[in-house]
Image (spheres, helix red, strand yellow):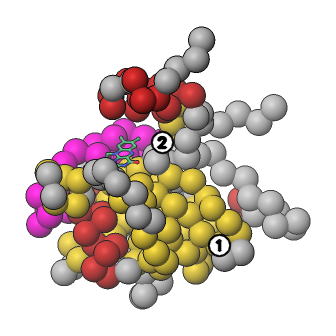
Amino acid sequence: MILDYEKINELDRYKVMSDTVVPRPIAWIVTEDDGIINAAPFSYFIPLSSNPATLIVAIGEKTPGVPKDTLANIQKNKKATICFPNKDNLEKLKLSATPLSKEQSEVIQYHIETQKLLKDFPPMISSSQSALFCNYYSTVQLPGKTTPIILEIKKQFIEDNRIDENSHIHVENVGRCGAFFSAMVKI
Ligand SMILES: Cc1cc2nc3c(=O)[nH]c(=O)nc-3n(C[C@H](O)[C@H](O)[C@H](O)COP(=O)(O)O)c2cc1C
């Protein structure tokens, strides 16, 4: 069967794409504005290059013409801390996807513990095994309601026991397969 993307409606296209491109990593992005800490998950997210060390994430609108808080904060303050979910913090991750007003903090509302490791970057989610401290790099022009932005990794936190002598990292991140969450299994 050949699926013709011109003939599939937007919702079905989303379902077909996200069920096919699996697994997708989930960026649990922490941003800050005026002292309010924002956290939300994004799975239209993927690494782009390791030199420069860049990632791309596509963020939509909160309401027509109004960017989601994460996008607004990155556009304004040019900083993002990308954390990763695991099976122990997945319920908090799901809660943090609830749309709140810009003045409300998901980390306060849902009791998500954070820690400030670097003064120039938003805090990380304490239960994340690794975090990437990023600067805004550029925006990709794409028609439609989502804005793809490129972030450059400047520093990384990794739990001490999760990096080996060969610089390999061992994390137990949860990703997204279509509408489901899935733990990565090594084969
Ligand atoms: C696992 C998961 C992945 C998501 N991926 C995206 C995404 O890639 N892009 C997007 O705009 N929203 C995505 N969302 C929805 C946002 O998390 C949600 O709109 C959130 O309220 C945005 O929060 P903010 O306004 O504080 O940035 C995702 C939600 C979940 C649960």
Residue at 55%, 46% in the rendered image: 25
Query: x, y percentage for residue 131?
Result: 54, 65
Image quarter where the C terminus lies is top right
Query: x, y percentage for residue 64?
Result: 14, 52
Looking at the image, which residue sits at the far top? 1
Q: Which residue is mark 1?
A: 53
Residue at 14%, 64% in the rendered image: 102
Would residue 134 appear left or right of 58 to someone viewing this image? right
Residue type indicated by callout 1? Ala
- The question of residue 35 being in magenta is answered with no
Name the quadrant containing residue 157.
bottom right
User: Eyeballing the image, is 65 above or below 183?
Assistant: below
User: Eyeballing the image, is 158 above or below 76?
Assistant: above
Give the residues in magenta: 87-105
Residue at 47%, 83% in the rendered image: 118
Of the residues tagged 1 and 2, which is closer to the observer?
A: 1
Residue at 72%, 53% in the rendered image: 170
Q: Which residue is mark 2?
A: 88
Query: x, y percentage for residue 22?
Result: 59, 33
Q: Residues within 10 Å of mark 2 (few under 14, many from 20)?
A: few
- The question of residue 95 being in magenta is answered with yes
Q: Is residue 65 visible?
A: yes
